[in-house]
Image (tube, coloured by chain):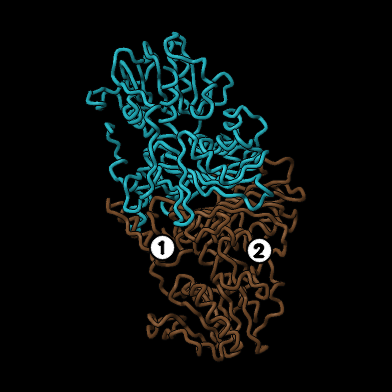
Chain colours: A brown, B cyan
Amino acid sequence: MNSPTLSLRHNHFLNGGATATSTIHIPRSTSTSRIRMSLQETGPSIAVVGVTGAVGQEFLSVLSDRNFPYRSLKLLASKRSAGKSMKFENLDYTIEELTEDSFEGVDIALFSAGGSISKKFGPIAVNEGTIVVDNSSAFRMDENVPLVIPEVNPEAMKHVKVGTGKGALIANPNCSTIICLMAVTPLHRRAKVKRMVVSTYQAASGAGAAAMEELVQQTREVLEGKEPTCNIFNQQYAFNLFSHNAPVQPNGYNEEEMKLVKETRKIWNDMDVKVTATCIRVPVMRAHAESVNLQFEKPLDEDTARDILRNAPGVVVVDDRASNRFPTPLEVSNKDDVAVGRVRRDVSQDGDYGLDIFVCGDQIRKGAALNAIQIAEMLL
Amino acid sequence: MNSPTLSLRHNHFLNGGATATSTIHIPRSTSTSRIRMSLQETGPSIAVVGVTGAVGQEFLSVLSDRNFPYRSLKLLASKRSAGKSMKFENLDYTIEELTEDSFEGVDIALFSAGGSISKKFGPIAVNEGTIVVDNSSAFRMDENVPLVIPEVNPEAMKHVKVGTGKGALIANPNCSTIICLMAVTPLHRRAKVKRMVVSTYQAASGAGAAAMEELVQQTREVLEGKEPTCNIFNQQYAFNLFSHNAPVQPNGYNEEEMKLVKETRKIWNDMDVKVTATCIRVPVMRAHAESVNLQFEKPLDEDTARDILRNAPGVVVVDDRASNRFPTPLEVSNKDDVAVGRVRRDVSQDGDYGLDIFVCGDQIRKGAALNAIQIAEMLL
């Protein structure tokens, strides 16, 4: 992999490389979905907005891994990072400051610099004829903006293509939603989900690279008997967990939870599906886990469910009851596929109308950068 | 607190002492429930079986904290630990090897040395006239053995008392069940729980002191870029999480999950209640968290639920939406009370027939040792 250096990738044990006990092979996406070209005149011009962040860095890794074609690449960030140089695919780039003039001639802009940047600069880019794939929550619930997981609802963006001269916004769903729906949608297509109860185990990476660094720093401090540094979160994260830091709404749900509720309805185009969620941050680096309880309209036994999941694109089944091996955040870290296991008939429901499953997916990759670049691939 | 030294207690940041950010006061149980005596001729003779383990050590702490009266104390462990000395309440004790003769003259024996020890020595003690409070799962589902959470179903053991000369077995429920039912039972009494979906976030302590030590060791190793030592669990625990290590049954549930299903029915004496659970180990030291979704037979709005919980014995409500402060494992560590928060109407259910809540409790204390000693207090 020809990726830029991200300080938090140096330790492969933190990031799910080969570990002493990592014996489950989780294959990458099949090669048929790859585009086997890279820097070339016929490709689109690309801009990455927020290139210094965890997701911005991963955009570059994924572009390279998937040989995404591009004729030019513009790296955009805040004034603070402008002027710094960054190597990508053996070429040196200078990071430019994001301004209103940044999008002239840009075909596709990958945004991951927070909601307020997207709100301000997304429409400016669209006016320049750029297609914006936005990783923030700014436009997700806008009824004119497709909210897309390519394996789930590619039809929502079928009218958007590069080369028409028309700009557009496409929203990347929230990481928890993507990871959940990657596993649940294939089951939903077969048996129709009536109600879904989700409890998440969310990694530091969802709060950005600084949160990952703080988790490492705090853990060192706690092990040394020192007071932990709490800059990103308002409480100790090392050897602890807490309710997701997103603001709590008047109904008592935090925004992260309501994203799961609302985005699921929009992505499935099903306003009747009932969803509740409890979102919790756990001291894990970069992959989310989710415990999902499902109630179906039609019967679906666990063997059939497992077969459906085995054949689902971007999903791998890790469900070895005898050796007690199931998906873990560590083993999906830096992997493309979402892993699902603990597939079992829910004993609290009659017949085959309920299942419990456990899902893990890399928050930065399929939860953000990979999904965005799969969207970009569909624009070509 | 006049407690024995447990190596894993030295670092108060790992164990939830006062931290820089710990601003929520969680009161201890009210003094009215305390017995204000200790070593005295009129108290029962006590034996602690498995005194060198995490729970065994906590038995001593709790006995001392609650001024539990005793006229003699016998510390029992395996041959390996026999002969070692241990200080308790300013007296030196010599640990004795657990044998068939250990229970002569013992009124109450607190067992926490694993199921096979309980199965072998529990009945021997009962034959000697000892009342055994057993922390293992050996007898929990035995229909002749009361399974008791003192705040929930004290009536189940009302026929058992010290001084009758008759031995008896009383089982301490599993930690996850105790912590869950401490919060859910007061709501169940008001509105009757029809169905409960539980996802747990379980600490290392449930697997014993060695697991807590391994989590610390692994975390150091990972931070140093070394391969993590995996002796207790078969995979990396530091900065990771995994499905509970209990054996998986043919129905796909692991034993930990089925304990929640079956023990809830027995404790509530309600064979109709529907429970499903997904049990996950997270890299936290000694307190469990549980995300609990509830479906009720009768309506129960969230304000009433919160009031009920505020008045529930052994429960503290931590539910500050404005400042995003809710229960955490760290803040309940070494505390008696179970903390509950995130109390909200379940948006996936119609009307006021559903609630989501988030519960945290010290696994070693209320999840094991404290509950057992509260049971012992009821024997007097």
Residue projecting furthest to the right: A298
Residue at the (52%, 41%) spot, across then down = B307
Whole-percent x, y for residue B80 in the image: 32, 27
Q: Residues within 10 Å of mark 2 (few under 14, many from 20)?
A: some
Quadrant in the picture for the N terminus of chain B:
top left
Secondary structure type for disc 2: loop
Picture residue at 29% right of the left edge, 13% below the top: B41
At which x and y percent is residue A318? 59, 52
User: Looking at this view, is A350 or A24 the one in front?
Assistant: A350
Dot 1 and dot 2 residues touching (CB under 8 Å): no
- Is residue A61 placed above or below A105 in the rendered structure? above
Residue A212: which numbered mark, if any? 1
The amino acid type of the residue labelled 1 equals Met
Horizontally, residue A175 falls left or right of residue B227, namely right
Distance between the Cα atoms at labels 1 and 2? 29 Å
- Label disc, if present, on residue A78 of the rendered structure: none
On screen, residue A302 above or below B207: below
Q: State which mark lies toward you, 1 or 2.
A: 1
Picture quarter containing residue B373? Answer: top left
Q: Chain of mark 1?
A: A
Report the residue that reaches farthest toward the top: B165
Residue at image mark 2: A313
Which chain letter goes with mark 2?
Answer: A
Does residue B96 appear in the picture of this structure? yes
Q: How far across and down, in percent of the image, does residue B366 sit?
A: 43, 34
Q: Quadrant of residue B73?
A: top left
Which amino acid is tagged 2? Pro
